[in-house]
Amino acid sequence: MEKIDKLDKKILEIISQNARIPFKDVALECGVSRAAIHQRVQRMIEMKVIVGSGYIINPKVLGYNTCTYIGVKLEKGSMYKTVIPELDKIPEVVESHFTTGPYTILVKLYAKDNEHLMELLNNKIQEIPGVVATETMISLSQGVKRQIPITKPE
């Protein structure tokens, strides 16, 4: 993998704060040409340093008022390979992680309300073959959300 240099990191800091910023503005702030910014961003996409961009949608505006984390225990850890595709079929599931600790999988999902959450748990997640138990944690408030730091914290 090619190394990323100081300029690449500066570009990443700028575009991670605002993915819609025009390259000409990034170039101005970095003191290089727009073409240089374009080439470097393309290279970082090819290197998989940048793996996506887009808009962040507020789930509450769409009626999804309950953010929930669900610890899922499986019959056997190896069943992860068959359970994940089933979780992927549930549109309200936005993340899943194969984890160490008391749960095999940690799921993040959004529900419209507690009734909707109960439906998702009872009729979808707990019905997946291999799921033996779930523990639900409702997020009351998100305190921190950010990208990893581009440069080393001081």
Image (cartoon, rainbow, N blue to C red):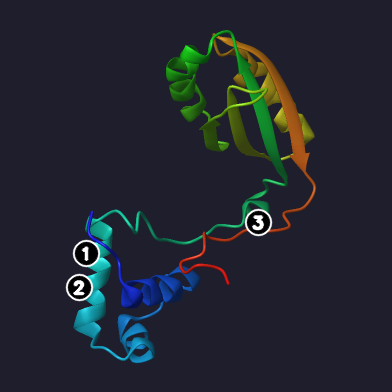
Q: Residue at x 54, y 9 (%)?
A: 76
| Whole-percent x, y for residue 34 in the image | 24, 85
Q: CA distance from mark 2 to mark 3?
A: 37 Å
Q: Is residue 8 above or below residue 138?
A: below
Q: CA distance from mark 2 to mark 1?
A: 6 Å
Task: Provide the residue designation for mark 2.
Answer: 39
Circles 2 and 1, Cβ within 8 Å, touching? The answer is yes
| Whole-percent x, y for residue 146 in the image | 58, 61
Q: Residue at x 67, y 27 (%)?
A: 71
Q: Give, as a three-letter code, the residue at label 3.
A: Val
Of callouts 3 and 1, the N-terminal one: 1
Q: Give, as a three-letter code, the residue at label 2.
A: Gln
Picture quadrant of residue 118: top right
Task: Provide the residue designation for mark 3.
Answer: 61
Name the residue nearer the viewer: 60 or 145.
145
**Is 31 left or right of 98, judged from the image as shown?**
left
Of callouts 2 and 3, the N-terminal one: 2
Q: Residue at x 68, y 36 (%)?
A: 69
Q: Tag 2's secondary structure?
A: helix
Task: Provide the residue designation for mark 1.
Answer: 43
Q: CA distance from mark 3 to mark 1?
A: 36 Å
Q: Is residue 96 above or below residue 42?
A: above
Q: Nearer the viewer, mark 2 or mark 3?
A: 2
| Whole-percent x, y for residue 135 in the image | 73, 24
